[in-house]
Structure formats: structure tokens, C-alpha cells
Amino acid sequence: MHAELVIRSERPDQPEVLALLDALDTYLAGLYAPEDNHILGVQQLLAEDVLFLVARRGGAAVGCGAARRMPAEPDTGGMAYGEIKRMFVAPAQRGQRIAEAMLAQLEAGLRSDGIPQALLETGGDQAEALRLYRRAGYAVRGPFGGYPDNGLSVFMAKAL
């Protein structure tokens, strides 16, 4: 039996969380060239406009994710949005719906801030991520936020 999963807002600059972010960076570096990885660094994750969540089981950090509040832009229908970033679950913890729970909590945080939509950019080679987002109600859309339409990225959106 697994210990209870606890997801809460925490700082991304803790050693355990930095290890998760490093594991994510290593995974992404194995899939894409550096210029095709659109990663928020730790300092950017510490910004006031970012909700950063850590999932813990038995006290150990097993996952993380962020939502960055963004202003309206023409590519988002003139509406503000929350951008989902840095979603990662430790490989040994996958298959337990941890990412799904984190994503739902990020969306709830955006909703409570009055943000009407969540958008994200992920890679076409990340089948697990694409399945997660589709199951959560995200649909493919065009580029936003200045991301290049490089043929590697998949852009998705969900009304909140």
C-alpha cells in the first residue's frame, strides 16, 4: 500500500525538487536539441506569476508541475491564459495518476485566479504526456506565446 499522496505549492529550489527537474531536463535533452527545449529555469519558476506544485508520497518528492499566468495575446483569442510547464513524475512512481492529480490542481489554481484557459507546449515524441493531456480534456491548437512552429512541438489548450 502506498503512502498518501500530498500535492502542495512549494519552492522549486529544494534539493529533492532540483533532482526531479534535472531528471526532466536529462530526459528532454535525450529527445530534442537544446534550441527545441522550452524550459523554465528555477529562477523563472520562483516568479510570483508561477504556481509551482510538488507531489510527495511518504515525504519524498515524486513529481512536480507549474502553471505560469500569462497575459492575453492575439494568438490566445485576446484572453489571458495559464501555461502548464515542467510536468514530471519520477519514473518509479508513474502509472498512479500523480500527473493527473497535479494537473487538476494546477488548473484549479488558474480557475481561482479567474484565468479562462490553460495552454501548453509539449513535444510530439512525448507519448505519455500527450496521453495525459488528451485524457484531461486538452485539444490540439496552433502555436502561442512566441513558440516556433518547428514541427516538433504539439500545442494544446483546455477551457477552464
Image: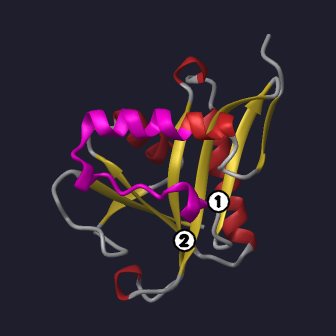
Q: Which amino acid type is marked by label 1?
A: Glu
Give coordinates of residue 112: x percent, y percent: 75, 71
Asked whether 103 or 12 is in front, the reply is: 12
Check if mark 2's residue and mark 1's residue have beta carbons within 8 Å. Answer: no
Residue found at the very far left of the displayed protein = 151
Residue depicted at 21% across the width and 46% down the height: 33
For the question of whether residue 131 can be seen, the reply is no
Q: Which amino acid type is marked by label 2?
A: Gln
Location of mark 2 (residue): 117
Quadrant assignment for the C terminus: bottom right
Is residue 52 shown above or below 62? below
Horizontal side of 157 relative to 38 (left or right) equals right
Location of mark 1 (residue): 107
Q: Residues within 10 Å of mark 1 (few under 14, many from 20)?
A: many
Residue depicted at 64% across the width and 73% down the height: 49
Quadrant assignment for the N terminus: top right
Is residue 81 shown above or below 30? below
Q: Secondary structure at mark 1?
A: helix
Q: Main secondary structure of the magenta part?
A: helix
Asked whether 15 or 121 is in front, the reply is: 15
Q: Which mark is residue 126?
A: none
Q: Secondary structure at mark 2?
A: strand
Residue depicted at 56% across the width and 27% down the height: 90
**Could you tell which of marks 2 and 1 lies nearer the N-terminus?**
1
Q: Residues within 10 Å of mark 2 (few under 14, many from 20)?
A: some
Q: Which residues are magenta?
A: 21-45
